[in-house]
Structures are given as structure tokens and as C-alpha cells.
Image (tube, rainbow, N blue to C red):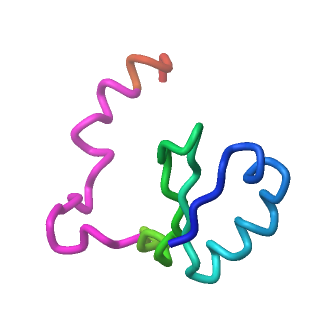
């Protein structure tokens, strides 16, 4: 793995990043002492898209959902 000093890394950053993205990682050193390792990221898969109906069968909504609250709704709106 290639080692570059900080000054060289600043000067050639875009070239070094392109090389790292292609799999050629490198180490940045300060005064000859290794400080950080730059490596390519692994492919990150996007999270699964949440879709409507993902809880199907886990909950149930009664057909007469409004009926239990009819009196409360009438009182709130003065019907």
C-alpha cells in the first residue's frame, strides 16, 4: 500500500481519491508517521423501500370504525 505525506496528499488529492476508488488504497503520513488509511467504500445497498400494506395481517380495523366514536364526534362539532 502506497504511503504519501500530507503535503503530497493535499497536492494530488483528486488523483489519490480516484486511485482509492479503484481499489488502490493509500496511507497518509505526517513526518513519516502513518496517520490515516484511505480505502474504497464497499457498495452500499439502499434500504428496502417501505410499502403500503407492510403490516397486512398484523392489525385489523373494524368495518364500523366511525360508530364507536360517533357520539364523541357529534359532541365535538356540535352536530
Residue at (58, 39) in percent of width and height? 30
Q: Which residues are magenta?
A: 52-73
Drawn side of residue 59 relative to residue 75, left or right: left
Q: Is residue 32 above or below residue 62?
A: above
Where is residue 10 drawn, in percent x and y?
79, 47
Residue at (35, 72) in percent of width and height? 53
Residue at (64, 57) in percent of width and height? 4
Based on the picture, tell me whether residue 51 belongs to the magenta stretch. no
Where is residue 65 drawn, in percent x and y?
28, 50
Q: Is residue 34 above or below residue 63?
A: above
Q: Is residue 75 above or below residue 56?
A: above
Where is residue 5 drawn, in percent x and y?
66, 49
Drawn side of residue 20 relative to residue 79, left or right: right
Q: Is residue 60 above or below residue 72?
A: below
Based on the picture, tell me whether residue 55 belongs to the magenta stretch. yes
Where is residue 74 drawn, in percent x and y?
40, 25
Residue projecting furthest to the left: 58
Residue at (72, 66) in percent of width and height? 16
Q: Nearer the viewer, residue 72 or 53?
A: 53
Residue projecting furthest to the right: 11
Q: Quadrant of residue 73?
A: top left
Drawn side of residue 64 relative to residue 28, left or right: left
Amino acid at each position: 500500500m502506497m504511503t504519501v505525506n500530507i503535503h503530497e496528499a493535499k497536492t494530488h488529492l483528486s488523483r489519490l481519491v480516484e486511485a482509492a476508488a479503484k481499489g488502490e488504497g493509500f496511507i497518509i503520513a505526517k513526518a513519516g508517521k502513518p496517520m490515516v488509511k484511505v480505502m474504497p467504500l464497499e457498495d452500499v445497498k439502499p434500504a428496502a423501500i417501505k410499502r403500503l400494506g407492510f403490516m397486512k395481517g398484523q392489525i385489523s380495523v373494524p368495518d364500523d370504525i366511525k360508530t364507536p366514536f360517533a357520539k364523541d364526534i357529534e359532541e365535538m362539532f356540535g352536530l
